[in-house]
Image (cartoon, rainbow, N blue to C red):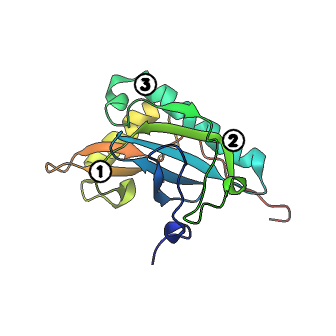
């Protein structure tokens, strides 16, 4: 079973970026020859919530850059960006399904990702979470990591300064 947008052939025209994967809030596009990814947030009715989640993720990259130990664990060369257009395999403009101003680029990390809570080396998972928390990056429960042959975390993605839980009226 794949992701909802996997078969749509989504890409960013005029660039080498094409669909790679997606999560609850965003879609990841990759330009493998350039070694870069773009993450763009999906359009949702709760734009303020999506903006808060994006800000928490972007701010976390800024905090990571201030800590050499954490910076070594996250994709390099983070930069916010604005995606001009997204099209599907038929060339149809589907940009309206996204928030073009809620996007960023980083270096592409090759590898298989695991949720931090699912890795076998519990001591390593705790060490990495402590590093992130010490840098002011407190939302690590959804973090995904790549693991080296020694069982240590090589890179981490999907972290934020804090969680922004979506609350609906009447809950």
**In the displayed structure image, the side of residue 153 where residue 149 appears, left or right:** left
Q: Earlier in the sequence, mark 2 or mark 1?
A: 2
> In terms of depth relative to the viewer, which is nearer, 125 or 157?
157
Give the spatial CA distance, label 1 vs label 3.
Answer: 19 Å
Give the residue pinned by disc 1.
146
Q: What is the C-alpha distance between the residues marked 3 and 2?
A: 20 Å
Disc 3, SS: helix
**Residue at which label 2 appears:** 52
Kindly indicate whether the residue at mark 2 contacts the one at mark 3 (C-beta within 8 angstroms): no
Instruction: Pick out the residue farthest to the bottom.
Output: 1
Marks 2/1: CA–CA distance: 26 Å
Mark 1 or 3, nearer chain start: 3
Q: Is residue 144 left or right of residue 160?
A: left
Q: Secondary structure at mark 1?
A: strand
Q: How far across and how far down the image is residue 119, in percent? A: 30, 58
Task: Check the picture and name the quadrant holding the N terminus.
Answer: bottom left
**Mark closer to the chain start, 3 or 2:** 2
Mark 2 in CB contact with mark 1 (< 8 angstroms): no
Residue situated furthest top in the rendering? 66
10 over 99 or under it: above or below: below
| Residue 136 in view in this figure | no
Which residue is identified by label 3?
65
Q: Residues within 10 Å of mark 2 (few under 14, many from 20)?
A: some
């Amino acid at each position: 079973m794949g992701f909802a947008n996997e078969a749509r052939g989504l890409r960013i025209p005029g660039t080498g970026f094409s669909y790679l994967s997606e999560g609850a809030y965003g879609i990841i596009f990759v330009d493998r020859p350039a070694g870069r990814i773009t993450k763009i947030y999906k359009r949702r009715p709760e734009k303020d919530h999506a903006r808060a989640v994006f800000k928490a993720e972007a701010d976390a990259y800024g905090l990571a850059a201030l800590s050499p130990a954490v910076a070594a664990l996250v994709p390099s060369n983070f930069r916010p960006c604005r995606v001009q257009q997204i099209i599907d395999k038929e060339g149809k403009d589907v940009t309206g399904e996204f928030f073009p101003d809620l996007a960023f680029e980083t270096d592409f990390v090759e590898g298989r990702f695991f949720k931090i809570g699912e890795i076998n080396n519990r001591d390593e998972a705790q060490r990495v979470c402590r590093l992130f928390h010490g840098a002011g990056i407190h939302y690590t429960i959804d973090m995904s990591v790549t693991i080296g042959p020694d069982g240590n975390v090589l890179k981490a993605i999907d972290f934020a300064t804090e969680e922004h839980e979506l609350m609906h009226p009447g809950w």
